[in-house]
Image: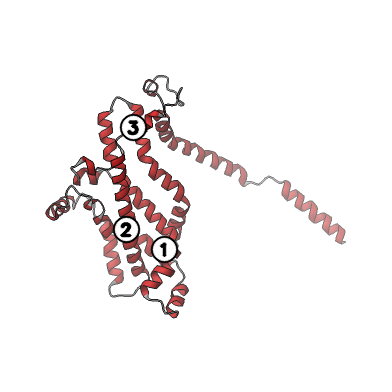
Amino acid sequence: MTTEATTEATTGAVRVFNRPPRHIPRRVVLIVVLLFFAVVFAMPLLWMISASLKPENEVLQSPPTFLPSEFQWGNYSQAGHGLLPFFLNSCKLAALNVGFLLLFASLAGYGFARLNFAFKNLAFALLLSTAMIPGIVYLVPQYMLFRQMGWIDTHYPLWVPNVLTPVFGTFLLRQAFRGVPIELEEAAKLDGASIFGTFWRIMLPQVKPALAAVGALTFMGSWNDLFGPLIFLNSTRLQTMPIALALFKGEYFTQTNLMMAAATLTILPPLLLFLLAQKYFVQGITMSGLKG
């Protein structure tokens, strides 16, 4: 009886194993569709990289070719000549924006998530409501204020307002702090930790993915900012990479290969940052949405 039962169970297992899963065709179709859209969206980037390595006469030839007949690596050295000051300015502003915004947003997010004070919910609602005001509405008053303060043609307007009004960062980190078990905070208080000590040593390490997500978004926003430097900066020595790319286009408008090389150098830092921080970026966004 036991042998018959074992044989029947083995036969059933073999039938189940040999049966083709119904979800496989659907998954294959989904993968093919996603790969198709991935290639479509990546084509402009791939064409830009390919054009940056081509001789000038091959970039716009007809019929077009995807790979260059001869790789012109010298295009990057020629395009990068003179871009170093703009690159350093962009790095400086990105570092200031990321560092101070993470500090202020994490403090504000922890306060709204864990501390109890009067009108906390009202203050948070007012903070979120400011995100609905278009920046163009307060551009003129902001410019007049910065002119009175002597900040025009300095880097202050490009990072100080951003780090003092971290609406999105505060919201994202508040949600992340609310998802941390309260038992960790209570244990720290029982051990005699202060509020700031609990925040710095216990709570902040628990929301590293959210910090990475906010930092990556802030870096890309600062690096790709064209409007701010165009309005507040007059000196060429203070300009950033987007402005340098616009100036480069005006100087080398007939040399498409050099323009594509300069554009590739411009997008390389945020692209590498996103690829390296993609895991933490997704974790941070997911973690911040777990708690309402």
**Considering depth in this image, is 34 or 209 the residue closer to the camera?**
209
Give the quadrant of residue 58. Answer: top left
Measured in 3D between alpha carbons, the distance from the residue under mark 2 to the one under mark 1, in whole angstroms, is 16 Å
Measured in 3D between alpha carbons, the distance from the residue under mark 1 to the one under mark 3, in whole angstroms, is 42 Å
Q: Quadrant of the C terminus?
A: bottom left
> What's under tag 3, amino acid-wise?
Ala
Q: Position of residue 34 (x, y in %)?
A: 50, 41
In the displayed structure image, the side of residue 21 where residue 136 appears, left or right? left
Q: Quadrant of the N terminus?
A: bottom right
- Residue named by callout 3: 79
Q: Note whether 4 is above or below 182 in the view shown.
A: above
- Residue named by callout 1: 176
> What's under tag 2, amino acid-wise?
Leu
Give the quadrant of residue 80. Answer: top left
- What mark, if any, has residue 101 been given in the picture? 2
SS at badge 3: helix
Q: Going from the N terminus, do you reach mark 1 or mark 3 first?
A: 3
